[in-house]
Amino acid sequence: MIDDDRPLEGEIVEEGGDPPPRPAGIAFDATVVTDAVKQHRDRAALTFGSVLVVVGTVLLAGRASDVVAAGGAALCIGLGLLTWWAFNGNYGLLVPAGALTGLGLGQMLGESGFYGNAVALGVGVGFLAIFALDSLRRRRRSSFWPLIPGVVLVAAGLLEHTSDWWDALGGFGWPLLLIVVGLIIVGGALSRRGTPKD
């Protein structure tokens, strides 16, 4: 015998009491999602606006100065990527940012009459900046690979056409070189040394 009091399939039945339980593990809060979307949008707008300001400033300075204009293209791209990295923190942005910014600065230095190889010096400084900026951001020692091309390129940039200024230093040349090498060795030793234990 069929019970006539049972609801038919698909029939809406109003009952008192608690609402039916939600499936386990599913929760949705529109407020949290909306706040996250707003924060992401604001961060993206801040990054994009800052990149535009930096690039516009370099372009404006390039119109006012031939020295800035010489490295303007590389400097625009490099500083734009560097600004993007400052907000994003992606190491993949820092590498081309350092190299291109260094290239732009080297071209500017060459235009201003630098006697050595200005482009090699600028790119080398850019690689050293990659190491330094990443170390500062992560608060620990960065990957050391940028130091290798950085030191080689800086040395090549400074040592090209050095005979004239080396002769100008006269008897001070070798002592100054020994002082610089000594300071580099001492600085490296101090950076590796841990804090003294009490």
Image (spheres, helix red, strand yellow):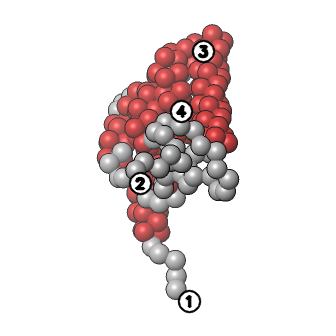
- Depth check, mark 2 against mark 4: the one in front is 4
Q: Where is 37 relative to 80, above or below?
A: below
Q: Where is 155 relative to 77, above or below?
A: below
Can you identify the residue that label 1 sits on?
198
Q: Secondary structure at mark 4?
A: helix
Can you identify the residue that label 4 sits on?
84
Q: Is residue 170 left or right of residue 87?
A: left
User: Which residue appears at 41% of the width and 32% of the height?
Assistant: 96
Judge by depth and name the residue closer to the eye, 10 or 96.
10
Q: Secondary structure at mark 1?
A: loop
The location of residue 29, given as percent across then percent down, is: 62, 45
Q: Where is 10 relative to 112, above or below?
A: below
- Say whether disc 2 or disc 4 marks the residue closer to the N-terminus: 4
Can you identify the residue that label 3 sits on?
59
Spatial CA distance of label 1 from label 3 is: 55 Å
Spatial CA distance of label 2 from label 4 is: 19 Å
Q: Residue furthest bottom?
A: 198
> Residue 142: which disc?
2
Looking at the figure, which quarter contains the C terminus? bottom right
- Say whether disc 4 or disc 3 marks the residue closer to the N-terminus: 3
The location of residue 135, given as percent across then percent down, is: 48, 53
The location of residue 24, given as percent across then percent down, is: 48, 56
Q: Residues within 10 Å of mark 1 (few under 14, many from 20)?
A: few
Q: Amino acid at mark 4?
A: Trp
